[in-house]
Image (cartoon, rainbow, N blue to C red):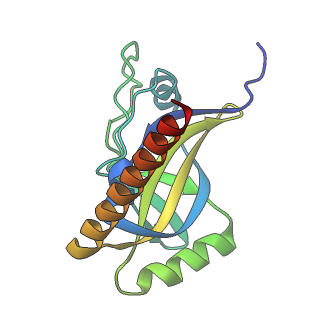
Amino acid sequence: MAKETGQKLIAQNKRARHEYTILDTYECGMVLTGTEVKSLREGRANLVDGYAYTQSGEVWIDNVFIPEYTQGTWTNHSARRKRKLLLHKMEIRKLEAKTKETGHTLVPLSLYFKDGRVKLELALAVGKKLHDKRQTLREKQDARETARAVAAARRRQRG
């Protein structure tokens, strides 16, 4: 069988970018069982309720939903178990120090295959206040209106 290359997106947490200000991102591997990988190959996962934390020099992710493999037997995994993340020791130390600061948290952004291996994009983030969320929405809306106005002006010049 040929070796996989490139990236294939499995799941994305769009809500995280809305509710948090992303300070830094990390790409990390995950310790998975065989049925979890098979279920991910079918493109089924949900990151919305997931969160990560550090514990005794290790990083763990919890509440990420990877459904049971449909053709699995008694060896099937539980859907919302906690999973270990694979990072370099210096990155783990940095994350431990940052998450001890008030308001900092670790949030999963996306789950994808990279060259045949499952990778997770983990973000160090700070929660947004309600007025920050409104400001972000206002900026997006302004950018959309500007793009529409520019496109309309170009159409008028051509026609």
Quarter residue 66 falls in: top left
Q: Which is nearer the eye, 129 or 42?
A: 129
User: Residue 155: x and y, percent?
Assistant: 49, 35
User: Residue 47: x and y, percent?
Assistant: 37, 45
Q: Which is nearer the eye, 157 or 119?
A: 157
Residue extending farthest to the left is 130
Q: Residue at x 56, y 63 (%)?
A: 25
Q: Residue at x 36, y 66 (%)?
A: 20
Q: Is residue 129 visible?
A: no
Q: Residue at x 42, y 84 (%)?
A: 100
User: Residue 23: x and y, percent?
Assistant: 51, 72
Q: Compared to 158, does 138 lie above or below?
A: below
Q: Compared to 32, does 122 lie above or below?
A: below
Q: Compared to 72, does 109 lie above or below?
A: below
User: Residue 87: x and y, percent?
Assistant: 63, 61
Quarter of the image with the N terminus is top right
Quarter residue 130 falls in: bottom left
Q: Which is nearer the eye, 40 or 124?
A: 124
- Compared across the picture, whether 42 is left or right of 30 comes to left
- Compared across the picture, whether 66 is left or right of 58 comes to left
Q: Residue at x 39, y 50 (%)?
A: 144
Residue extending farthest to the right is 2
- Compared across the picture, whether 116 is left or right of 13 comes to right
Q: Is residue 158 visible?
A: yes
Q: Which is nearer the eye, 46 or 67?
A: 46
Q: Compared to 150, does 24 lie above or below?
A: below
Q: How many marks?
A: 0
